[in-house]
């Protein structure tokens, strides 16, 4: 059996392997998953995240601001100047831009032309993300652009994420690839009591990342749509997507994974390690629709403490 029929069939297999691998806890058990086959018209198509419109923002051209996309020039200072204040619409034309880490502030639109590569210079510390979104109300229009690190530079550690979102709200990222990082392609989270909210990743790609394609740690109203997470390997858990809270106060609410593809990830497709949550934690609310998994040990793995958090996980295949 091959192709989509094989993927749908394998997609309903559940495993507790993640819990055994990550925790080694005798008290761990599988979190119950509601598996459903539904008519496509019966599935609620509304996304959870909401995004406010932008006003008229001043346009800033990256080349005019000093960016040089020749694949050799270190553009770190130019990127830091370019994103030194919020309230701009930054446009970056085609090119291969080498740079150190930088921060995208709130109330920013970033438009990347097709053929744009933003490439790490290989100097990130073990816990330093490459690009951090710091502030609410950000839209990145990727148009197929790539954010790349060089895995050969980072053979240890797991914190060098490509796109890092923590304690932010109203973020929309479309058609962007974040690959070959020393951590996760994309990371969404927040400190205790301060989840990220209203975030949409649409048609994004994450390949060949060291730890995960995408981590969702502490978040509410998250939409991941028509996106691909592939070939994760290097350090556990090594899943395409990992929903893994750190503390009992973390939340995973209004999480929708719609038509995501996971392939060739060393750990598996989608993981949910819910053990840190307790019976009095905020109930989880996770929906997975038409997940396609191929060439990986398992499509879905769940683990929770024996005294488990409440809530629901729905795994839906449409027809």
Image (tube, helix red, strand yellow):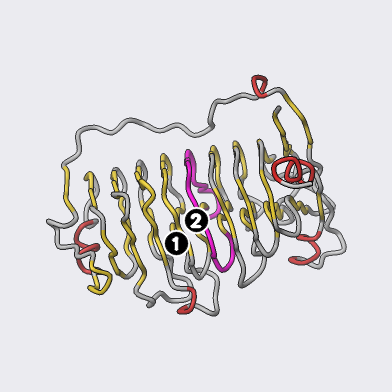
Residue visible at 48% across and 48% down? 204
Task: Identify the image quadrant of the C terminus.
Answer: top right
Where is residue 282, by image quadrant?
A: top right
Task: Name the side, left or right, on which 214 lies relative to 118.
Answer: right
Q: Which tag, 1 or 2, sits closer to the chain's start?
A: 1
Judging by the rendered image, the residue that carries numbered circle 1 is: 162
In the image, 3 versus 198, the foreground residue is: 3
Residue visible at 49% across and 66% down? 180
Q: Are marks 1 and 2 in contact (CB under 8 Å)?
A: yes
Mark 2 surroundings: few (<14), some (14-19) or many (≥20) residues within 10 A: many
**Residue 266 seen in render:** yes
Judging by the rendered image, the residue that carries numbered circle 2 is: 186
Residue visible at 77% across and 67% down? 21
| Membership of 134 in magenta stretch | no
**Residue 287 seen in render:** no
Q: Magenta stretch?
A: 189-212
């Amino acid at each position: 059996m091959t192709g989509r029929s094989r993927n749908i069939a394998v997609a309903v297999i559940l495993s507790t392997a993640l819990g055994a691998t990550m925790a080694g806890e005798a008290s761990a058990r599988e979190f119950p998953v509601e598996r459903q086959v539904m008519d496509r018209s019966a599935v609620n198509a509304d996304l959870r995240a909401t995004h406010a419109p932008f006003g008229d923002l001043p346009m800033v051209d990256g080349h005019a601001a000093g960016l040089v996309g020749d694949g050799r020039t270190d553009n770190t200072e130019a990127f830091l100047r370019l994103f030194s204040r919020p309230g701009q619409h930054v446009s970056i034309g085609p090119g291969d831009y080498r740079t150190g880490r930088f921060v995208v502030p709130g109330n920013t639109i970033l438009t990347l032309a097709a053929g744009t590569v933003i490439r790490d210079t290989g100097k990130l510390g073990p816990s330093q993300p490459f690009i951090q979104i710091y502030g609410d109300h950000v839209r990145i229009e990727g148009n197929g652009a790539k954010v790349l690190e060089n895995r050969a530079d980072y053979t240890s550690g797991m914190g060098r994420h490509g796109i890092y979102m923590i304690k932010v709200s109203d973020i929309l990222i479309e058609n962007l690839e974040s690959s070959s990082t020393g951590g996760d392609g994309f990371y969404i989270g927040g400190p205790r009591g301060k989840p990220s909210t209203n975030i949409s990743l649409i048609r994004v790609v994450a390949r060949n990342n060291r730890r995960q394609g995408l981590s969702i740690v502490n978040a509410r109203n998250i939409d991941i749509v028509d996106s691909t997470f592939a070939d994760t390997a290097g350090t556990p858990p090594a899943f395409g997507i990992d929903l893994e809270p750190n503390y009992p106060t973390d939340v995973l609410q209004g999480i929708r994974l719609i038509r995501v593809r996971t392939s060739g990830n060393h750990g598996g497709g989608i993981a949910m390690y819910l053990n840190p949550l307790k019976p009095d934690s905020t109930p989880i609310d996770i929906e997975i629709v038409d997940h396609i998994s191929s060439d990986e040990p398992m499509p879905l793995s769940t683990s929770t403490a024996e005294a488990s958090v409440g809530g629901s996980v729905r795994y839906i295949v449409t027809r």
